[in-house]
Amino acid sequence: MVAPSTARKLRICLQDAELQRLEDVFIDTAAGAEEDRLEAIRLADACLLILRPAYLDIIAAAPTVELLRRLQKPTLIMINQAPRRLACSERVELIRAMDAIRLFKIPIASEIIRTRRCYQLSPQLGLSVEELGHEETVQEMARAYKAVSNFCDKVHRDRRLREAQKRVFTPPIIPLAHTTYYPPWID
């Protein structure tokens, strides 16, 4: 289900999703939509930060990362549009970018989505990457989906654990009356 929304309508969309018993809802905000992004983060159980490994993108993500940290939202960074590997090693620019991204101290998904021509071609043709028959890309997307799915599962487990801890019965503390014992020979 895809539903366009704004910050003001987001709560209603989430209530509709709950009525439809949707387990996971992904809210995609535009990069410059400050109000929408802030409201989406507030309402979210967790956040997936899609980030290109480019200097300007990393700098632009810093305020969002700070907001996520301040609101204590579980977050996973997914690297998107990374340059393709050279023969057996990563490109220097990606290594440097990843070092900078690690300074955010937020988990980074193990799967990196690479820049591929088929990602630009598929929307132009109205076809999915799978329909284009690019097997390597399909496998890459399946691994990326698995990383996001594992993150969502962990967020669900952590939330259930917190809710269970809240429900644990703690007997009330009853203050004992303070009495002083006086031996009979003291008046």
Image: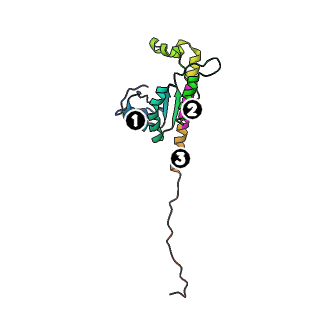
Q: Which residues are magenta?
A: 144-154
Q: Is residue 40 magenta?
A: no
Q: Is residue 150 magenta?
A: yes
Q: Residues within 10 Å of mark 3 (few under 14, many from 20)?
A: few
Quarter-of-image position of residue 98: top right
Numbered disc in front, either 2 or 1: 1
- Judge whether residue 148 can be spotted in this image: yes
Say what amino acid the circle numbered 3 marks.
Answer: Ala
Q: Pointer 2 and pointer 1: residues touching (CB < 8 Å)?
A: no
The CA distance from mark 2 to mark 1 is 25 Å
Dot placed on the residue nearer the N-terminal end, 2 or 1: 1
Q: Position of residue 154 (x, y in %)?
A: 56, 37
- What quarter of the picture does the N terminus occupy? top left
* Residue indicated by mark 2: 150
Element carrying mark 2? helix
* Residue indicated by mark 1: 38
- Label tally: 3
Rendered residue at 51%/41% (across/down): 159
- Judge whether residue 26 can be spotted in this image: no
Say what amino acid the circle numbered 1 marks.
Answer: Leu
Say what amino acid the circle numbered 2 marks.
Answer: Asn
State the mark number for residue 174.
none
